[in-house]
Image (cartoon, rainbow, N blue to C red):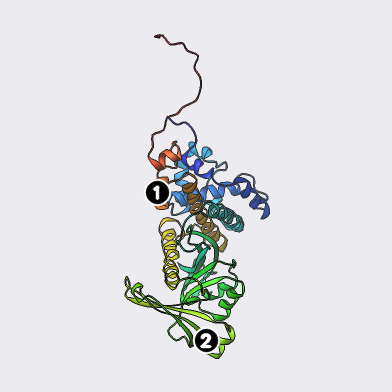
Amino acid sequence: MYVGKLVFSQVMDFMPLHTFRRCVVRYRGNYKVKTFTCLDQFLCLAFAQITYRESLRDIEACLEAQSHKVYHMGIRGKVSRSTLADANEVRDWRIYADLALALITTARNLYRTETFLDDLDETVYAFDATTIDLCLALFPWAKFRKHKGAIKLHTLLDLRSNIPTFIYISDGKLHEVNTLDILPVEAGAYYVMDRGYLDFSRLYTLDQAHAFFVIRGKSNLQCRRIYSHPVDRSTGLICDQTIMLTADRSLTDYPEKLRRVKYYDEDTDKTFVYLTNNFTLPALTIAKLYKCRWQVELFFKWIKQNLRIKTFYGTSENAVKTQIWTAVSVYVLVAIIRKKLDLKISLYTMLQVLSVSVFEKVTLLQLLTKSDYRNDSGEISNQLNLFS
């Protein structure tokens, strides 16, 4: 029988504790704190994410029912609703944001050898945003409509690993295209975006930073064709053109040539027009790149269904951001475990199994692979054989 750590403690062992402590010191998270530290707060919120707790009352009740195991989970302070609510209210959310970014760096290094498209070695990002509806009476800081509140989660997703590399949380009134001004740009990388981000001055900024973009064009695009490249229409390609913008404002904002690819998708029975500043990739690869943008939509759907980011444990902006960044940390942590243990199961399956096993004493590898475990102490016995 395995007599080691709880499953929850084994999961948290993959968290860089020294990095977390530096984040706490950076923002003075434990200033004048005597019992319930930032680590206790994070472990409680991570427990809530893994086990799908809906409220502070749920967290308190579940941990109180297993009070003899709470210490072995790493939680040293007494867990109560009021203590956890106060911590979410006043402790800087940037502590957990910095931890999530450190975990993201680790995960990206682990997944950097994953294949994405056969003819593409560069990093490909999908940039999009999702809206989380809130009650304006409870969240008055989350402005959206006259009688409705919301926040937006602006996410840059690395399509090779499905790991978010940049997350910005704003109120619902901020238009998505404005976040291009704060987007970190990596030279040589590809940025795939929907037509809601079509702003030629901002796209020209990406071009000047030596990055590539693939974006869906609008139906009222004014341009003139300079050259038409041959295409294989049996693949769904309709045309591959080099163009110049003709509208005065658009031409001022983007004075260089653009590539226009028109593609018919049989699966959806729709025709798409893509704009890009890359002139070397095959036209069919451009179409495939944009089709992969759907992964960011699946990411949003996944985290909304499997993590606690639609119902919140607090109503302040600090509490909401703390919970979201904790959810991101748990997502990335599970992805790190999956890669380090070389597991073939999905993240969804991992979370489902972990959610009902956090208080068990079984090795993670045995739990997640259904393999038999033998507790071999490795000790050498000096007992003589009775029968030779």
Location of residue 259 in the rendering, given as x and y in whole percent from the top left corner: 49, 79
Residue type at mark 1: give it: Ile
Location of residue 266 in the rendering, given as x and y in whole percent from the top left corner: 32, 72
Residue type at mark 2: give it: Leu
Q: Circle 2 — which element?
A: strand
At label 2, counting other C-alpha atoms closer than 10 Å, the crowd grade (few under 14, some 14-19, many 20 or more) is many
Q: Which of the labelled discs sits on residue 245, or is there none?
A: 2
Location of residue 232 in the rendering, given as x and y in whole percent from the top left corner: 37, 75
Q: Circle 1 — which element?
A: loop
| Of the pair 129 and 91, the residue shown nearer to us | 129
* Farthest residue, direction front: 230
| Lower sequence index among marks 1 and 2 | 2
At label 1, counting other C-alpha atoms closer than 10 Å, the crowd grade (few under 14, some 14-19, many 20 or more) is few
Instruction: Determine if residue 359 is in view.
Output: no
Where does label 1 land, which residue?
A: 345
Image quarter (top left, top right, bottom left or bottom right) of the C terminus = top left
| Of the pair 20 and 378, the residue shown nearer to us | 378
